[in-house]
Image: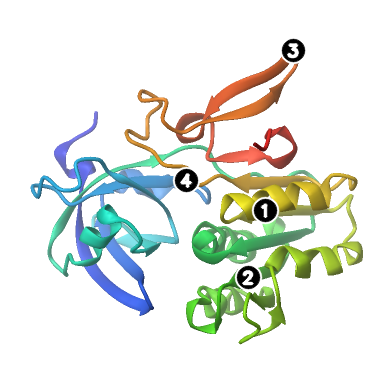
Amino acid sequence: MVTREDLTAEILSNAEVAPCHYLLALAVSPVYRDARPGQFVMLRPGGLGIPFLGRPLGIYSLSGHARGARIEILYRAAGRGTKVISTRCEGDRLEVLGPLGNRFTCFPGMDTAVLVAGGIGIAPLVFLAERLTTGPAKDRVRVVAYIGARDAATLLGVDRVRAFGAEVRISTDDGSAGHRGPVTELFRNEMGSFDTARTGVFACGPYPMLRRMGEIVADRPMPCQVLMEERMACGMGACLGCTIEVRGPGGPEYRQVCTDGPVFDLRDILWR
């Protein structure tokens, strides 16, 4: 049974960690203890009336907290809703719905996970990197993370994934850190060094980046899962606002990112 406590969260901290980028820590109910990488929450500043709809935000980290759990959300204050959330302080409460959606999955025999992140897409991949490197010894794999951003100031999550023992490759659009150019270009340049039979690719970032990933891996038998970032109103499949087109056995079909995703097989998506 869902209780009122399951639908609210207390802010533990909400700090700006890069220009217009914030790290939000929340004390949430015990239902979040079973959250998995790839899942998300719908957040809304309760009682303010603005924004009316929640905002879908990926889980950055998860740990125990007193009688419940502690989750972190890494987000960019880009629109009206996230800008309002960025003004909330320690002790304030937010309306929260989650954990929602499906999760990243590993295939039998996978010994290397390649993470490809563009911008704020690093958030759910940090959670994944933690689980792949700090879980039971039998489940741990080598993690190689390709992290891209516009510039050095907005590179996020690098220290976290390095702390988990991941190998990190950096790319910035302006060349202020690491490789100069798109992170997909850096991944493409090194893709041949991975054993396709034992490597899984996990990507999250803006739509053009994920479409380019589809082109890059099209001719290689390398499993690739992507976390789709779409606008959502409800997070539960009722509004149909996050519909995408995928390949089906009889032709194109439609799926909701919130309930059928947000994680999809890259090769199933029909890019428009």
Q: Which label belongs to residue 202?
A: 1
Counting residues from the start of the chain, the first of labels 2 and 4 encountered is 4
Q: Which label belongs to residue 147?
A: 2
In this orientation, which residue lies closer to the viewer: 106 or 60?
60
Label 2 amino acid? Ile
> Which secondary structure lies at badge 3?
loop
Q: Are marks 4 and 3 in contact (CB under 8 Å)?
A: no
Picture layout, residue 23 above or below residue 17: above
Residue 169 position in % (x across, y down): 70, 76
Q: Nearer the viewer, mark 2 or mark 1?
A: 2
> Which secondary structure lies at badge 2?
strand
Q: Which residue is mark 4?
A: 39
Quadrant, the N terminus: top left
Tell me what residue is drawn at x 29 percent, y 75 percent: 15
> Which secondary structure lies at badge 1?
strand
Q: CA distance from mark 2 to mark 1?
A: 12 Å
Q: CA distance from mark 3 to mark 1?
A: 27 Å
Q: Which residue is mark 3?
A: 250
Tell me what residue is drawn at x 59 percent, y 63 percent: 118
Q: Which label belongs to residue 50?
A: none
Label 4 amino acid? Gln
Q: Nearer the viewer, mark 2 or mark 4?
A: 2
How many residues crowd mark 1 within 10 Å: few (<14), some (14–19), many (20+)? many
> Which secondary structure lies at badge 4?
loop
Label 1 amino acid? Phe
Q: Residue furthest left?
A: 47
